[in-house]
Image (cartoon, grey):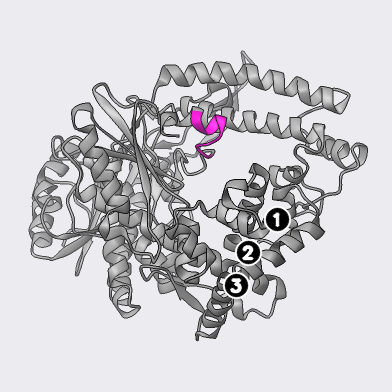
Amino acid sequence: MHQLVTTLDQLHDVINYFEARDGFAFDVETTGPHRGVPAVNEVTWLSLSTDGACSVIPLGHPNGYRLLRKATRRKNKQSGEWEHLPALFDEPPKQLRPSQVFGALEPLFFSDRTKVAHNAPFDLLSIAKYFPGRGYPPPPYGDTIVGAWMLNENRLLGLKALDRERYNLDYDHDNTGKCVEKHTFGQVHEYAWMDGQTTWLQWKDIRPKITAEGLEDMWALEMDVLHCLLHMGRGVPVDIDALQELRTRLRAEMEHAEAEVYRAAGRVFNINSTPQKQKILYDEQGLKPRKLTKKGAPSTDAEALEPYKGRNEFVSTLLGYQDVSKILSTYVEGYLGNPDEDKPTQIFNGRIHPMLKQYGTVTGRFSCSTPNVQNWPRADTVWGKAIRDLVDPIPGFKLLVADYAQIEQRILAHFAGKGALWQGFWDSIDAHTATAAAVFGVAPEEVTKQMRQVAKAIAFAINYGAGPQKVADMSHTTLRRAKQILATHEKQFPEVYRYKAKLLRTVRSRRPEPYLRTLLGRKRRLPDLLSHDQGRRAKAERQVVNSHIQGSNADMTKLALTRLHKNLLPDMQILLTVHDEIAAMCPAETAEEGARVLHDAMAGPEMQLLSVPVTTDVKICNRWSEAK
């Protein structure tokens, strides 16, 4: 079979060969100023691989086989400035046009054969724009990065890393894939062939292991999630005018916040200089460092300063400035772009196109990039509302927004079993209110805001393995008092601590590698529970409960997304999942029915997987902040 395809006859030979197979792997190389954004990148190489064949199809590579001159620079004799000279190559060979290639391949990609890729949403969405009127190819799908992650979430997941691990292959010494247009035709041909070939080999290795590990149901769920992510790849409409207004507002707010910092410090200094901030905080203000940097210096990040917020004016004003600065640089200028800082825009045709990664965390939760919507501030904060309000449903549509009510606490109650926390949910008492009432010995209606904040700190300590110092910091109380609070909590909620101890014993006892399973059966491996290094072992112990609860939360969110995707009304679109929220948009005339579909997907009878009720509240709104 042809290794390099440059004519229609060769392409038809390849198609005939692949049509006789049940599945194939494919890989794309992309170019353009936004090569990482499938909606607008340009596919210039396509590899197809299956049993007995791997074919590479160039689609407009600009370079020939020979490098005539390396990229260099020279000084302009007249201006005296340095000029950058790009690399010079000989003429490229004749290649097929994208319309010819994808027109011929359309029946193959839209067949019932399994389409396999490494990070399949990126590759499938990158080629979708070449099938006008069809969109992305249909299932069944296979994704080697998802499979590799399910088999070992602690390892490097890039294709090159997996090839080194499995086959001892190291074939990209020149970093060809990062920017293919800087390399010769021959280099990219070889690179693309290896990418395509090893993707298929990895698939043949990974797929049977999924079954052997007892992960077949989780694999089916993750492939449904993949299908849902393709649907979400259409992007999220944003209000560009509102975004520009927010930029103006934030710039003014930042100037004010900066002046407040200088006032609290008693002098002007370089607010972006870490050494200068360290001097003011820890020398002049006399604060005790709560955290050190990797180099052993006192940290000035938000986590280190948060315990002093509200207790030290300089810290409070500095944190306020840093919040505004982050919102401006990360979300506003991050989306709009900033030519002065060489930041490209992330808005295309009025939409952002976040790439949600279902394999992006060890617990199973999504991560996200270009842009990252998973690190949006929480919806109950001023800036969290402002950012969410940039999501702008298209004319004639409404936003549907729902979030799980205290889902991690419900999962904890489920695993811990009958007790005060479990009973509180059946009595429809807010979890933090119930916790505060038990710890402080008051009736639920007598719980104050401060008491509830203490309960939140306790929940954080349980779910994330934090100690009494963190509880003290979050509750704005003393370490001694925090220890007393935790001791009282253990007396009032013994089932929670029995669950934690039993889970740790069970996981630690498993060999050859300790692991736990989440609510729906996902494996979370914790090899450091057997480490001889006390620090690594302690960290793994803290991760046990967190992995169990967060991983189960991820299971439920992913299952809800797939249920919603399978039951969408006409023209209804899933937009985002952020934290425990799911947002969709729906034609205004069917919004009520759409809200019922969203509610049923998240908390209908088939989602009552816990021994306590799972609840959600769906809001129909024009702006996201209206949902709170």
**Image coordinates for residue 191, horizontal then vertical, percent:** 36, 55
Q: Earlier in the sequence, mark 3 or mark 2?
A: 2
Query: Along the horizontal axis of the image, is 432 left or right of 207?
Result: right
| SS type, badge 1 | helix
Look at 29% across and 46% down and name the residue there: 599
Camera-side residue of 415 and 188:
415
Query: Along the horizontal axis of the image, is 578 left or right of 432?
Result: left
Label 3: which residue? 494
Q: Earlier in the sequence, mark 1 or mark 2?
A: 2
**Which contiguous range is marked in magenta?**
378-385
Query: Along the horizontal axis of the image, is 149 left or right of 273?
Result: left
**Image coordinates for residue 284, horizontal then vertical, percent:** 92, 36
Q: Are marks 1 and 3 in contact (CB under 8 Å)?
A: no
Quadrant where the C terminus sits is top left
Camera-side residue of 407 and 143:
407
Whether residue 97 appears in this view of the structure is: no
Numbered badge on residue 471: 1
Whether residue 231 appears in this view of the structure is: yes
| SS type, badge 2 | loop
Amino acid type indicated by mark 1: Val
Look at 57% across and 22% down and name the residue there: 340
Q: Is residue 485 above or below residue 595?
A: below
Q: Is residue 222 above or below residue 379?
A: below
243 inside magenta stretch: no
| SS type, badge 3 | helix
Cα distance in 3D space between marks 1 and 2: 11 Å
Label 2: which residue? 465
Specify few, some or many for label 2: CA neighbours under 10 Å numbering under 14, 14-19, or 20 or more.
some
